[in-house]
Amino acid sequence: MIVRLISIALCFLVISCRPELRQTITYPCPMPPPPPACNSTDFSTVVFDTSKVINGWRWKISRVLGAETSANEWGLVRVKQNFLLIKGESAATSKQLPVTLKNVNTLDFGWPIGLTETGFVTRVANADITGDASIFETSVAGTNVVIGKPLNDLVNNKIYWDGHSTVSRDGEIIVFASDRPGSLGGTDLWFSNLKNGEWQEPRRLSNDVNTPCDELCPQFAQNDSLLLFSSAGHQTAGGYDVFSSFVTFSGDSILVRAPRNMGLPINTPHDELFPQMTDAQTIYYASNQPKASRTKASDFDLFVLHRVEIKGNVPAKAVIPPPPIVDEPQIVDTPVETLPKEVAVTTPDVDAEMPVVEQRGTIQGTVLHQETHKPVVDAEVTAKHNVSKIVLAKTNTDSAGKYLLSVPVETPVEIVAQSPELFYDNAVVTVPSKKANDTLVLEKPLQLPLTFYLRINFPTSVFDAPYQYTLDSLGVDTDQSWQQSLNQLVENVNLSGKRLKRLVLIGHTDDVSTDASNMKLGRQRVDFVVQELVSRGINEQLLEGRSAGERMLPEKRKNETIDVWRKRARRVELVKVMQ
């Protein structure tokens, strides 16, 4: 398997600082930290049985004539309605060649006279910077590809690999691969929206799609309802596999649902790249699977999965078109090791059960600034399992403060919103099964405060042994432990990064005892919280502790008991000082 070598040899690929990716090193670069574990799991489901005739048709996989030479044909990329073929022996010699599809499995080189389209290609941005690539505007006419200016520095992150772009039909959202800071490992899929003619700060697609392995070659398909891509993570037959995910747009945000492996025989124990679906029954991709009678990986060729009508098998009027590639594939399970080396796959002529698919629904909500009530743009929103706290999905809010999260149904999920300048807010939501494949709109927005009240439930005169569960703003016990509350606070502080100059903590008490003893008690409670934060990795130099004792008691609410009022009074107040 050549998983790591491929991610840089692809298309207009470049040399990386990571030792396992580089081919030659001309310029020194520092060793990066160890990447997260890149683990894929086996996948052996045959989705397209190329041996079986059904209702007068069958699936067929063919090498594409004109793109099956001894050179590497890395794959097709779309320029609006037409295509470029990426071809070359190495990163240094790869070129983008305008092509047209003469028929389903034959290419013609060049575009018709008079046809011109603009799009994007990936190029090595600076040969002096190892591992750098950028996305450039381009114009294609006839046989000529004219490279224009690069996209802005937000999309093209200096010294990092940014490429393999695909743009939505309206031209408002671009999805691309990048190994920039914030990636889970290798290259992840990121997106940016176009606003006032400028591409905005990119945001990483959710963890449903990205893994610590490489995700590459994104392509919108089926009128932007699908995102196709290649990945060495998730469940794979080996190397890079082709995956598809359903897509939902909301303002300037994009929700990409959990991906589905496109199955055997499209995917093989070798590498499949650059999926390109031209209609519901035709998908192109590149693969380095061995040629006939060979066992070792070969150069990359272009392949196409398409339907073939079998004449004479059934009366013409009885011929029923095959199901679309993504919506209703036939599923037959066959272990990978039993598959023949040829492209065609023979499977038993039996009915097979569909695999169990986790039902999911979409949560839609809004994040507001608690004081100004204005939308919080680019707030981080995370869905966690309410018990295990495992992250189920993550996204960022759009320019209207809205977000979309795909989560399992009938599962209590904690939704946490936060931003670097503000603190966090959370809510527990369960999507009912009747909302599977549908959207649950939350009417109550999450509100991020400028001043945060850590409501650890301290007994009246105690500072280092709080009750297990925190309180809400009404003084009522929650189901969140004080340890979990501190863990979430640490996440929020870390999100602020280097912009956080100081975190001020102010300890408050109730009205029991003297002013002097309460000033001391308030400081002791702050010291307790400070040490807990330091033990969780927060730099102690960032933390400034103060005490207000009983001098800033909250106003007593109507009909509130003295016990609940005093619970609310015992709190730690936090304020961020940003640079």
Image (tube, rainbow, N blue to C red):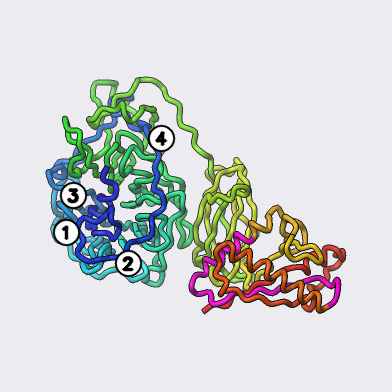
Residue 513 placed where, x, y %? 86, 73
Report the span colored magenta.
486-514
Question: Based on the displayed image, in which of its 4 quarters is residue 536 positioned?
Answer: bottom right
Which numbered mark, 2 or 3, is in the foreground of this view? 2
- x, y percent for residue 495: 52, 66
Q: How far apart are marks 2 and 3 (CA)?
A: 30 Å
Q: Mark 2 points at which residue?
A: 156
Q: What element carries label 3?
A: strand
Of label 4 and label 2, which has the lower sequence position? 2
- Name the mark nearer the viewer: 2 or 1: 1
Work out whether residue 257 or residue 466 is closer to the camera in this orientation and state it. 466
Q: Which amino acid does label 2 sit on?
A: Asn
**Camera-side residue: 359 or 212?**
212
> Which of the two marks, 4 or 2, is nearer to us in this view?
2
Number of marks drawn: 4
Along the line of sight, the residue nearer the viewer: 149 or 521? 521
- The residue beneath circle 1 is 92
